[in-house]
Structures are given as structure tokens and as C-alpha cells.
Amino acid sequence: MKDKWNIALLQFDLAFGQPEQNRAKVKELVQQLKSSDKQPDVILLPELWDTAYDLTRLDDIADEHGEQAKAVLREAALSLNSYVVGGSIAERIDGQVYNTTYVFDRQGELAGRYSKAHLFRLMDEEKYLAAGDQPGLYTLDGQPTGSVICYDIRFPEWIRTYALHGVKLLFVCAQWPHPRLNHWRQLLIARAIENQMYVVACNRVGDGGSSTFCGHSMVINPWGEIVAEGMQQEEIVTAEIDFALVDEVRSRIPIFTDRRPSLYRME
């Protein structure tokens, strides 16, 4: 089990409705990481990095069973010898399209998947996407981790479910727009504090459709302290985390021991 990880968040602009162009961009960023001094243990991509929010054309551009995205992510894992939490892509299965995360291990093997559970009505997601119904829980390097997607962070009971399953690090991929940057930052910090876990969140930048996306990808520790934060520009945000801090925080303020679930059911 490895306690300390180097994290890399690939915060970049997306070509609206151009999967081939976006896959090429991911490959370019992976090459940048490969030539860097500090190699990552895990990389995280933004939400719907293949299609962006071109929802009305998903029938034409969604990735059948995610095979093309999987190939790019598998190649990245093998090239960097790192875990890859592949943001999310538009995955078509049996005629339905899901907003799905794939996770690959250092050997390029699929280590897990998660489909977005809460669909964002303000962007008409429920008209074009099917909702997932399972949590995204993974064990990477012996560490319990999990992932959610964008709007999911507004549902603290969903994130608490992850914490109750032992998750110490939560990955969040997003396309979070202006004017709600303040919500993005405060929600992520709150989820870290109340669950005493690392929150590692990758947002996109640039314009897409009628929205401007605000970046500010973040790494937040279990005290709610910001370890690293991007700006509103293309960049690779990096940080080192230490899982021992999760155990320390949870032992000092034992919220999971002090929970009283019988009081929380108001029937």
C-alpha cells in the first residue's frame, strides 16, 4: 500500500462535439506529463471530455461501449505507469447514453467504472442521458477511493455513502460553469471537511454551447485546506497527498463513531 501519491489534474478546453480532436488533446497532455520531472501516481480528466456538452448530437457522436475512450485511457495508464481516473465520456450502451467514468490501473486494466447518478436539469441532461444507479468505488494501490461527477457534489448524502464505505479520496470530474464558481469551491471544501477525506476535483475551462466554464480544479485535504488550485486557463494542476492524514483527522474528530443513524430517519 502506497500512502503518498502525486496527483495530476488535466484542466483543459474541450472542442465542442469533436471527439477525435479531444482524444488527440488528451494524448498530447499525457506526453507532457511523461516528460515532466515528477511522474504522477494518478491522473484525473474533466467531465465529458470527449464530446463536451453537445448533448443534442449524442446519437451521432457517443462512444459505443466507450471503446475509443478506453483505448486512449489505457494507453495513458501504460505510458505513465499511473492510475487513470478518466474523467467521464458519453458512453452508448443498448441504445442509451450514459455519462461514465472509467478507471484504469497501472497495468492498463479496467479497475472500475461509474455512471453519473444525478442528472442536471438546468442543462437538459435528463433528456439525453440515462442515470447510473451504482456508486463508483475503487481500491487503488490498496487505498479506498471513489468517484462522482459534477452535479453529484450537491448531494451530501451520496458522498456520505462513499465515506461510510471507507473512501479516503473522492475524485470529482466536472464541467462546472460560471456564474457558480463560488458554489464549486465551497461545495468541494464542505464535502472534504464533513467526510474527512481528500477531494480531488478536475474541471474544464473554455466556452461550450452557451456556457463559460470556470476551471479552478482543486485538491483539498481532510481538514478542508486547499493543497492546490488551478486558475481559469489550460494547465496541469499537481499536488502530493498523504493518506495518513485521513486517519489522523478521523481519529482526532471521530464523527463516524459519533453518528446516530437512528435519529436521521424521520418516518
Image (spheres, rainbow, N blue to C red):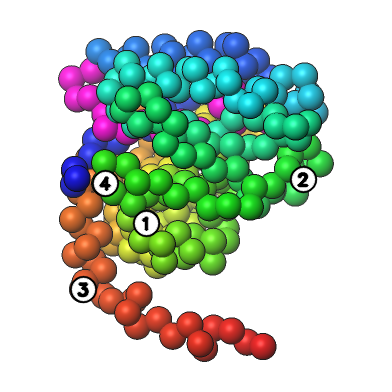
Marks 3 and 2, how far apart at CA: 42 Å
Q: Which residue is mark 2?
A: 126
Residue at point 48%, 64% (across, down): 161
What type of secondary structure mainly makes up the magenta span? loop
- The residue carrying pointer 1 sits among few (fewer than 14), some (14 to 19) or many (20 or more) residues within 10 Å by Cα, namely many
Identify which amino acid the numbered label 2 is placed on. Answer: Glu
Q: Nearer the viewer, mark 1 or mark 2?
A: 1
Horizontal side, residue 219 vs residue 37: left or right: right
Query: Which image quarter: residue 206?
Result: top right
The front one of 215 and 54 is 54
Marks 4 and 2, how far apart at CA: 36 Å
Horizontal side, residue 3 vs residue 228: left or right: left
Residue at point 53%, 52% (across, down): 135
Instruction: Find residue 142 and name its label.
Output: 4
Residue 239 horizontal/vertical position (percent): 26, 38
Residue 75 horizontal/vertical position (percent): 40, 16
Identify which amino acid the numbered label 3 is placed on. Answer: Arg
SS assignment at label 4: loop
- The residue carrying pointer 2 sits among few (fewer than 14), some (14 to 19) or many (20 or more) residues within 10 Å by Cα, namely few
- The residue carrying pointer 3 sits among few (fewer than 14), some (14 to 19) or many (20 or more) residues within 10 Å by Cα, namely few
Q: Nearer the viewer, mark 4 or mark 2?
A: 4
Identify which amino acid the numbered label 1 is placed on. Answer: Val
Horizontal side, residue 210 vs residue 218: left or right: right
SS assignment at label 1: loop
The boundaries of the magenta stretch are 36-53
Residue at point 49%, 17% (across, down): 71
**Quarter of the picture holding the N terminus:** top left
**In this rendering, does residue 202 appear at all?**
no
Q: Which residue is mark 1?
A: 167
Answer whether residue 240 is magenta in the image. no
